[in-house]
Image: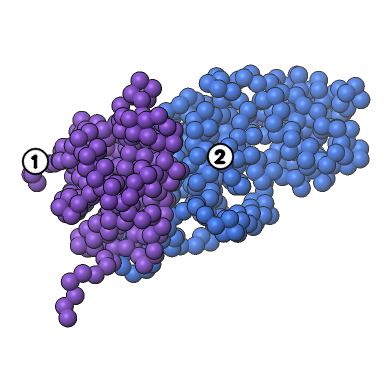
Chain colours: A blue, B purple
């Protein structure tokens, strides 16, 4: 298929439909409105359903119902809206249902702003909802990667019966890049024998539920979820790495920020510095194994984020105290500039930090 | 000897957890009977609430989905939109539907969502131990209105059926009661009509059923039935508020 030039949010909608998602429930919020708008225009053409819910809470609970009924279903929102959806995300995780949630992150806290941000790393990876659960979090850095991951998200969600969140900062949603829609790698997906589609008098009732009133049963259930999480860590962790071995400095950045960091690295390389990059593609599971390649030569790590430092916690966990971890970030919708990052790298390389 | 009564196949064999004298059991049976009589158990998907009837998913003999507190109409919307051939219902109490789930029920009704809601109103939060509900009567004592519900502090009880009947999408709205045999029969008739209208694709239907809570009202089951009749009926008048013209 030929490449087409698309705006990020519309490309996300197109990728979802191409992946077989025919149900979308959402609520308007900037900067992701082109997703529901695109779905409202395109889903009726494939006999799908677009429904604008009365609230973010209702939207995610409609997703909960549709996922229980066996559909490929998606919702999208932005930071404060995702905060409201956490109730439903926790239930969907608890009831082990597949769904895809797109979060085009904007600055916070509170109403915050509408410009790109990465200040919801904690919200996405630590479980904004209640209980012992995790869900997959993808953080693409280009529109091509965005459509690839959105398409694959539906398969991953169904394979593990887990919510999958695709996190793009506002930049991913708003910019235009050429994209090509490619079928994700084949996965063997089990039939949804658990779905609430009516017994038709042929089987025992199916029950979609996250309530376990007996503590032993709940502990057993949570351990079952935990085993699934371990499987996901083993099979689905993804990252990009660049010159990590023997680097003077290793940068860690995801999403749009990683592209800016790459520019800064190039500048430093022109002066003979050796700078590596670890770019997590899955924020959960965090690619801890990528940090094993870091050698004694490396003077320090630099986490760069559009926040005051959230992913840096995972970097520190991954490096196990072996190296100093420094931080550079802008927040509130401000975007880090390559020169500032370059200066930080030089300081670490030159022992100034 | 001829059999004159048997359990409905609309309910499972699981023993109810409800308190003695609670009328949830009667209402469960009526819903089960209606689903069986309409021969739709194989198509039915019920959505259970949070509250006393939280375990309804174990009692109805059909596919069930347990929702978050108040969100049953949104979950039911998701289920119905995916498989419109399913017969989808929510079973909700007054704390669930009239308080935390007020937005979900209003908008499901406004959209004319083709689902059926069984709304059990016993004027109190039962499961959590007898707190004040939006449906608690003025002067009624609850654990969070220990001096009796004060209108100046918390306003008047919400009349859900009257409120929903202002919405064109709500095609069938009826308030019934289960405090005696005659009214139990009327309740069953209303439940059946609501499901029949869903089957003919009419849109949203709700049956508000006045119910008792002997445990949290601090009354015996018999006293509770009398209390319902004397106190709830005057404020929550029984009757149909909306029916499509052609089936009146």
Q: Report which residue position mark 1 lands on.
A: B245
Residue at 25% x, 42% y: name it: B228
Please report, as a chain letter, where disc 1 is located: B
Q: Quadrant of the C terminus of chain B?
A: top left
Residue, far bottom? B1
Which of the 4 quarters of the picture holds residue A226? bottom right
A208, above or below A248, in the image: below
Nearer-the-camera pick, A92 or B149 = B149
Nearer-the-camera pick, A348 or B40 = B40
Please report, as a chain letter, where disc 2 is located: A
Is residue B117 in view? no
A276, above or below A67, in the image: above
Nearer-the-camera pick, A307 or A181 = A307
User: Horizontal and vertical percent for residue B187?
Assistant: 19, 50
Q: Report which residue position mark 2 lands on.
A: A129
Label 2: state its secondary structure: loop
Nearer-the-camera pick, B112 or A273 = B112
Which of the 4 quarters of the picture holds residue A14? top left
């Amino acid at each position: 298929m030929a490449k087409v030039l698309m705006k990020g949010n519309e490309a996300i909608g197109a990728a979802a439909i191409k992946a077989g998602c025919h149900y979308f429930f959402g609520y308007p919020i900037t900067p992701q409105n082109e997703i529901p708008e695109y779905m409202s225009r395109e889903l009726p053409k494939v006999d799908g359903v677009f429904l604008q819910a009365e609230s973010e809470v209702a939207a995610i609970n409609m997703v909960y119902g549709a996922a229980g009924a066996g559909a490929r279903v998606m919702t999208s929102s932005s930071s404060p809206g995702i905060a409201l959806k956490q109730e439903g995300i926790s239930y969907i995780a608890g009831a082990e249902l597949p769904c895809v949630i797109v979060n085009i992150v904007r600055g916070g806290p509170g109403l915050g702003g509408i410009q790109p941000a990465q200040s919801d790393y904690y919200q996405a990876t630590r479980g904004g909802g209640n209980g012992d659960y995790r869900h997959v979090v993808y953080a693409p850095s280009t529109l091509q990667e965005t459509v690839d991951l959105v398409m694959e998200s539906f398969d991953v969600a169904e394979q593990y019966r887990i919510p999958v969140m695709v996190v793009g900062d506002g930049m991913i949603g708003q910019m235009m890049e050429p994209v090509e829609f490619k079928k994700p790698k084949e996965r063997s997906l089990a039939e949804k024998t658990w779905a609430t589609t009516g017994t038709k008098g042929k089987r025992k009732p199916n029950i979609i539920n996250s309530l376990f009133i007996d503590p032993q049963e709940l502990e057993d259930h949570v351990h079952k979820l935990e085993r699934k999480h371990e499987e996901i860590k083993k099979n689905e962790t993804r990252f990009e790495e660049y010159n990590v071995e023997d680097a003077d400095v290793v940068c860690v950045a995801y999403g749009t920020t990683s592209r800016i960091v790459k520019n800064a690295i190039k500048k430093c390389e022109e002066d003979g510095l050796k700078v590596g990059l670890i770019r997590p593609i899955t924020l959960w599971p965090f690619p801890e194994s990528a940090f094993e390649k870091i050698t004694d030569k490396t003077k320090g790590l630099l986490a760069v984020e559009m926040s005051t430092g959230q992913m840096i916690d995972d970097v520190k966990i991954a490096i196990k105290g072996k190296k100093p971890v420094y931080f550079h970030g802008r927040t509130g919708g401000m975007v880090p500039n390559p020169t500032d990052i370059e200066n930080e790298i030089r300081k670490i390389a030159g022992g100034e930090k | 000897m001829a059999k004159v009564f048997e359990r409905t196949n609309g309910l499972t064999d699981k023993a109810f957890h409800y308190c003695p004298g609670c009328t949830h059991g009667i209402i469960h049976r009526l819903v089960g009977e209606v689903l069986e009589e309409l021969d739709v158990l194989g198509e039915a998907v019920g959505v259970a609430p949070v509250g006393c009837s939280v375990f309804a998913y174990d009692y109805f003999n059909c596919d069930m989905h347990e929702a978050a507190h108040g969100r049953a109409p949104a979950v039911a919307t998701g289920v119905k939109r995916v498989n419109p051939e399913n017969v989808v219902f929510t079973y909700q109490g007054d704390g669930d539907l009239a308080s935390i789930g007020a937005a979900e029920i209003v908008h499901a009704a406004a959209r004319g969502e083709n689902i059926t809601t069984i709304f059990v109103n016993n004027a109190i939060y039962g499961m959590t131990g007898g707190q004040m509900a939006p449906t608690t009567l003025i002067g009624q004592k609850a654990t969070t209105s220990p001096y009796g519900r004060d209108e100046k502090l918390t306003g008047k009880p919400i009349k859900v059926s009257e409120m929903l009947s202002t919405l064109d999408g709500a095609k069938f709205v009826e308030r019934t009661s289960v405090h005696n045999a005659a009214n139990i029969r009327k309740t069953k008739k209303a439940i059946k009509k609501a499901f029949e209208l869903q089957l003919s694709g009419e849109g949203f239907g709700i049956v508000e059923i006045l119910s008792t809570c002997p445990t949290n009202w601090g009354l015996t089951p018999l006293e509770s039935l009398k209390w319902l009749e004397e106190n709830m009926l005057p404020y929550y008048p029984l009757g149909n508020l909306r029916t499509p013209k052609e089936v009146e």
